[in-house]
Amino acid sequence: MKTYNIALVGATGMVGRTFIKVLEERNFPINNLYAFASKRSAGSTLKCGDIETIVEELTETSFERDIDIALFSAGGEISKKFAPIAQKCGVIVVDNSSAWRMDKDIPLVVPEVNPDAAFRHNGIIANPNCSTIQCVVPLRALEDRFGIERIVYNTYQAVSGSGVGGVKDLEEGTTDCYPYPIQNNCIPQIDVFLENGYTKEEQKMIDETRKILDRPDMKITATAVRVPVAMSHAVSINVTLKEDFEIDEVRNVLENQKGVIVKDDPSKLLYPMQLETSGQDEVYVGRIRRDDSFERSLNMWVVADNIRKGAATNTVQIAELLIEK
C-alpha cells in the first residue's frame, strides 16, 4: 500500500488532536507525520498509531520538505498566511478555517455531498463550517430527489464549537469566551453581528450551503444559538421542496443517503440527541414530519458531532478522496 507524508497544522488544539484520532481509527496510510503548532506547544510529543512525532513551531520554512497533504486547523489568520506557503511548496492543503471557504477558486467540500469538487483544487481545499456540514449531507438527498425551494435553519450549537474557551465557560461558569454565562442559558449569538442583522455564523451557513449544493439562488435563512451542551450540534431544519412528497418516501431517501443515520420513531421516543452522537462520524436525522402550515414543506432534526464530522473527520475524508484518486 502506498503511504503518504502528512502534516498537521494546529496539531495540539481540540480539532488537531481529533485529526490524529481519526487518522488512526481510519487507518490512513501515513509514512511520515509532521506536527506544527505555536512556539508554546513546540517540543511536545504526539502519537498516531505506531508513529510518534515531535511538535514543531510553525514557520515559513516548515513545508520545505516532502509533504503530500497538510490538514490545517489553526484559525483563519494562520491559514491565510501559511496555506499559500504550503501550496507553493507543492503541498495540498485541506483547511478547516473560514479563510478560504467563499473564495470562488477554492472548492468547499463535503465528501458525501460534492466529492468531485475536491479535484478542482489549485492546492487548497476548504472544509465547511461545522453546522453547515451536518445539514448539507441530508439536504443533498432531498435536493437530488425533490429539489429544494427554501431552507430555514435554527441551530443549537455546543460550546466545543468555540474551542477550549467555550468548554471552560460551561464547566466553570466563567464569561471569558462568551458575553454572557452559558451555564443554564442559551445565547442567540454565534460570532459577530453583521449589518444585515444576521451573525457571521448564520451568514456562513447561508452562503456555504448555496456554494456546496451549487445553488446560488437558493432561499435560505438561519438563526444560530449557543446552548449549554459540551459536544455535538443540533439543527432544526424546515425545508420547502419543489415537488410534493410522502413522508415515507422522504424517510427512504434519507436512509439511502451516504453518511446519514435515520433515527425516527416517536412511538418509541426515538430521535437523535447530542449525548449519543458525540464521538460518532455520521449525521443523525429524526423528527421527520410534514409542515402542515406550508405546502411541500417538512421539518427534520439533525444532530452530529461538531468536532468529528463537523471538522476533523470531514477533513480526513477529503484527504482520503485525494489519495483514492
Image (cartoon, rainbow, N blue to C red):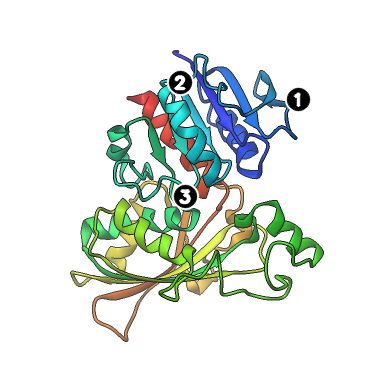
Q: Earlier in the sequence, mark 3 or mark 1?
A: 1
Q: Nearer the viewer, residue 61 or 48?
A: 61
Position of 306 relative to 115 (above/below): below
Q: Nearer the viewer, mark 2 or mark 1?
A: 1
Residue 300: quadrant of the picture: bottom left
Residue 288 pos. (x, y %): 40, 70
Between residue 280 and residue 187, name the one nearer to us. Answer: 187
In front of the other: 39 or 203: 39
Residue 95, x across and y down, in percent:
47, 39
- Report the quarter where the N terminus lies: top left
Question: Mark 3: which amino acid?
Answer: Ser
* Among numbered discs 2 and 1, the one appearing first in the sequence: 1
Across and down, in percent, residue 235 comes to 48, 66
Which residue was labeled with disc 1?
43
State yes or no: discs 2 and 3 in contact (Cβ < 8 Å). Answer: no
Q: Residue at x 47, y 33 (%)?
A: 83
Q: Amino acid at mark 1?
A: Gly
Question: Which residue in the protein does label 3 denote?
Answer: 98
| Label placed on residue 68 | 2
